[in-house]
């Protein structure tokens, strides 16, 4: 599934199951909450914090999907073609960062 299809799938889901989009500020708060859940898993599973028993069953993929869902909601409700924006950003990063990362001594 490409990003455009994902945006359409989210829009269809909202129309069929969600009644309507939450407003942009609510979705921004939701995004922050979901990113926090991802951060908690990463910091405890891969970082230096110990993982609590209650966190061991948390699914990182599911939490990342929650972040993606809310990002797609925000793109839909603000009229952003995320496929186009992503392609443009990837092209920019490719041109700008190719040599920079190859020349970064910290990455060797």
Image: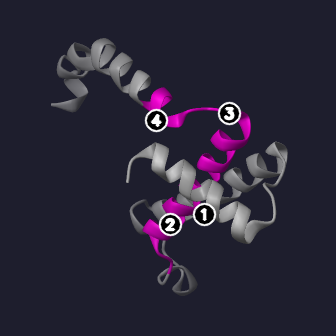
Boundaries of the magenta span: 58-86
Name the residue tied to disc 4: 83
SS type, badge 1: helix
Q: CA distance from mark 2 to mark 3?
A: 31 Å
Q: Earlier in the sequence, mark 4 or mark 1?
A: 1
SS type, badge 4: helix
Classify 76 as above or below 37: above
Q: How is the image coloured?
A: one colour
Which residue sits at x=50%, y=66%? 41
> Is 81 one of the magenta-colored residues?
yes
Name the residue tied to disc 2: 41
Alpha-carbon neighbours of circle 4 within 10 Å: few (<14), some, or many (≥20)?
A: some
Alpha-carbon neighbours of circle 1 within 10 Å: few (<14), some, or many (≥20)?
A: some
Instruction: Give percent across and percent down for residue 69.
Output: 59, 57
Instruction: Give percent across and percent down for residue 82.
Output: 52, 35
Frontmost of labels 2 and 4 is 4
Frontmost of labels 3 and 1 is 3
Question: 64 or 36: nearer the eye?
Answer: 64
Which residue sits at x=60%, y=57%? 10
Name the residue tied to disc 1: 37
């Amino acid at each position: 599934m490409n990003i455009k299809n994902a945006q359409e799938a989210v829009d269809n889901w909202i129309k069929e199951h969600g009644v309507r989009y939450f407003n942009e500020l609510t979705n921004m708060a939701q995004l922050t909450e979901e990113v926090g859940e991802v951060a908690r898993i990463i910091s405890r599973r891969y970082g230096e914090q110990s993982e609590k028993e209650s966190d061991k069953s948390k699914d990182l993929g599911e939490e990342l999907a929650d972040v993606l869902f809310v990002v797609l909601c925000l793109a839909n409700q603000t009229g952003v073609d995320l496929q186009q924006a992503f392609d443009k950003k990837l092209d920019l990063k490719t041109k700008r960062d190719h040599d920079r990362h190859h020349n970064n001594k910290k990455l060797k």
